[in-house]
Image (tube, rainbow, N blue to C red):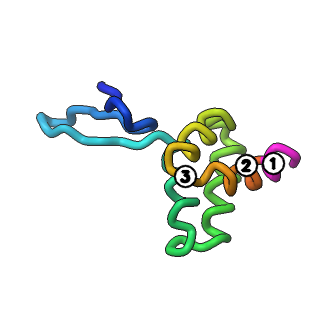
Amino acid sequence: MNMDPGIGGIETHQIESVMVRITSPARTIAECLRHIDRLGMHQFQEILWSAWRKRQLTSDEIMGCAGQLGVAVEMKVYLTTVQGA
């Protein structure tokens, strides 16, 4: 397993001699917010709530990936909502 330098939240694994890039849950959520116009608000909120309830990630992990993808300001609003519940 290797972390790609400069690309947060993406790991490279070798599966049956094929290199595969796998994103972390935090990176996946940040990507969903980045493409919310394609995904839809309701679906994004459900993904975020589901991951948060299962304790799959921390707010620092999410904000780190959101910052790299340029959606940190928007993500902060959603994280404030899930942390308050």
* 42 lies left or right of 25: right
In the image, is residue 70 above or below residue 5? below
Q: Which residues are magenta?
A: 80-85
In the image, is residue 36 above or below residue 67? below
Q: Which residue is mark 1?
A: 80
Q: Are marks 2 and 1 in contact (CB under 8 Å)?
A: yes
In the image, is residue 33 above or below residue 40? above
Residue drawn at (87%, 48%), measured in percent from left and top? 85
- Mark 3 vs mark 1: give the one in front: 3
Whole-angstrom CA distance, mark 2 to mark 1, is 6 Å
Q: Could you say whether the residue bearing mark 3 is in a helix, strand or loop? A: loop
Whole-angstrom CA distance, mark 3 to mark 1, is 18 Å
Q: Position of residue 28 (x, y in %)?
A: 49, 50
- Mark 2 vs mark 3: give the one in front: 3
Q: Amino acid at mark 1?
A: Thr
Residue drawn at (55%, 52%), measured in percent from left and top? 70
Whole-angstrom CA distance, mark 2 to mark 3, is 12 Å
Q: Could you say whether the residue bearing mark 2 is in a helix, strand or loop? A: helix
Residue drawn at (82%, 52%), measured in percent from left and top? 81
Residue 8, disc = none
Residue 76, disc = 2
Q: Which residue is mark 3?
A: 70
73 magenta-colored = no
* 13 lies left or right of 50: left
Q: Could you say whether the residue bearing mark 1 is in a helix, strand or loop? A: helix
